[in-house]
Image (cartoon, rainbow, N blue to C red):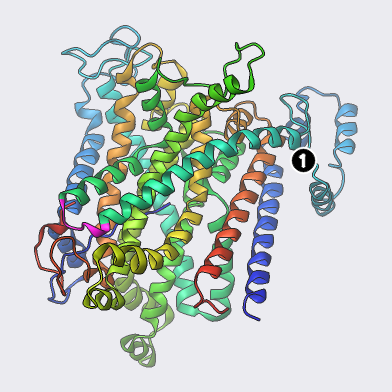
Amino acid sequence: MRGADYVIKRTAFAVITVFVAVTINFVLFRLAPGTAVSNLSRVPHATQELRNALKQQFGLDKSKAAQYGIYLKQLAHGNMGVSFANQQPVSHNLWVALKNTLPMVALGTIFAIIFGTLTGVIAAWRRGTALESTTVTTALGFYSMPTHWLGLMLVILFTGILPTGGMSNDFLIDPSFWTHLRDVLSHIVLPSLTLGLVLYGEYTLIVRSAMLETLGEDYILTARAKGLKPWAIVRKHALRNAMLPIATLVALSLGYIVAGAILIETVFSWPGIGRAVYDAVLERDYPMLQGAFLILTVSVVFFNLVADLLYFKLDPRITT
Amino acid sequence: MSVVLNEPGLVVDPEPARSRGGFVWRTIKQRPSAAIGVTLLTLIILGAVIAPWVAPYGLHTRVGPVFGHPSWSHPLGLDDGGIDMVTLLMWGARISLIVGFAATLVSMLIGGTIGVLAGYFGGRTDVVLMRITDYFLVIPDVPLMIVVAAIWGPSLFHIVIVIGILLWTSTARVIRAQVKSVRERVYVKRARSLGAGHTRIVLRHVLPQVAPLLIANTVLTIAVAIFDETALSFLGLGDPSRISLGKMIENAFQRAAISSGAWWAIVPPGLLVAVIILSCSLIGGALEDALNPRLRVAHLSARTFRLRPLVGRGADSL
């Protein structure tokens, strides 16, 4: 049966990738400078007895292989350790952060996909016109800007008009549901817009390239010879086929979205997973950093898998 | 995150390339977008190189008040330490470019080696190397860079290595595909039957063929490396003792340049990074699509219907 094989293969690949990431994670933090005791428990001038006790408590007296085994086992149970900063379980902290990040990132990505596809198609279709040069130059401009810098530019432009930090106004006392919603929505505009604009640049360029390649195909010539309207050719013949590479490239830009989220949340103090990474770096909160890296990797791998399977569904030519 | 920038509508000189360097040079000369990129990049590099001699003020000398306004003697104002922004920009570009080029060199060495080995030897080597590449391709770079940089501690050398060892995946894949096709060509087989060793074949016959693509990839990687340096610096993982463009943005952000209204401390460094990345994208993109023959035909042109693209039509202008 077509499909089952492919799904299993891709899923296995995704699982192994996560495993590789987990291993990198384990190895990296064991390579950290300083002794494991001082890194993990932060007792700089501990006595020898305390050190030994901690070593035993953290299982650091066991062999590296045994430690790795324990690490995997704990991870499988969802235990990522305890944050140094607020003494909460890392998994709890990350869950809260992830819930804040998702709407912001989703909004920006949807914005970018809609407008990026639109202008990308127009740029390819209107090739050689002033409209195309304008579109491409704008897209390239947004693509080239450092994400956080673009965010800061928006802060400068919109100070006083829109809230430029945080996720909600803490001074609203017992707001009604609608007031709260409006408050959060006004806070989400700038971070989402920043991500949206950066991705918009990237997607416009990708869609334009994919469309141009498709427009060079012979079946477009055939459609044209049949006397179909240009718009019908673009919509029914070119765009549908161009969607395939676009789907892959959007999946590949996931890593970029993650990077963008970290930078944007830092600029706008958005209490999401990117901000958690930033805070963890500042405070050298290794368990949080480790957990956040893992969550980010797993989500990228997961969405990649989704894109792969989607691609398979879209393109009947894939057989393996 | 490299974006393929396609520039169709221009037929590349039908005359076969006499030398690889000639190809790159001709592409740049024929495409205005690439020419603009090269010009801008050259100017910035020049400014960065001569910084020690022409920078108007000292890099560490306080010449006025904190966030001093732009004036005739300080066209871009002063930063949070009262240091002249023009001076800082020249020195900052220097460090950013050094990191960009050095990290790209590291990533080219790794990616090029893996790509050539996988493509040239094929078989099990290929499978193993490409598997490793695939895993690294999916794991998001920037968080991994952050983790490594946070553990290693901030220093310019670490930043270069961290960026370099994580950016090689796309290079490896591109080079591998190219080497694979070159390997099957007749002249490579002839060279082999004449008794040429692997090293000689790779160096004399395979590498020159993949060079234009390698150059395109290098330029695009420089852009990514500079972006990554800016991002890492912004997160406080840059070398605290060296001023790079990313560090300048971080300093301005941390010391509240925005709420002090000192836009001049924060706009120029980011703009300069954007221009560097833009130039690299223009050059790399132009080279990449000069190498892609599929893009030279377009059946659905905006105004008139043409079977073949026209030479020298305005479409090549960006």
Residue B154 percent location from the top left of the image: 53, 33
For the point 24% across and 37% down, which residue is it?
B49
Q: Quick check: A205 left or right of B247? A: left
> B314 or B200: nearer the eye?
B314
Q: Quick check: B14 left or right of B241? A: left
Most distant residue in the left direction: B312
Residue A163 percent location from the top left of the image: 47, 19
- Does A128 appear in magenta? yes
Q: In the figure, B36 relative to B76: above or below?
A: below
The residue marked by circle 1 belongs to what chain? A
Most distant residue in the bottom direction: B193
Instruction: Indicate the quadrant where residue B226 lies.
Output: top left
Residue A65 percent location from the top left of the image: 81, 54
Q: Residues within 10 Å of mark 1 (few under 14, many from 20)?
A: many
Amino acid type at mark 1: Met
Q: Which residues are magenta?
A: A124-129
Q: Quick check: B24 left or right of A139? A: left
Q: Please identify the quadrant where the C terminus of chain A is shown.
A: bottom right
Q: In the figure, A47 relative to B180: above or below?
A: above
For the point 65% across and 30% down, which residue is it?
A284
Q: State whether residue B17 appears in this view.
A: yes
Residue that numbered label 1 is attached to: A80
Q: State whether residue B158 appears in this view.
A: no
Residue B156 percent location from the top left of the image: 46, 37
Label the magenta part by its dominant secondary structure.
Answer: loop
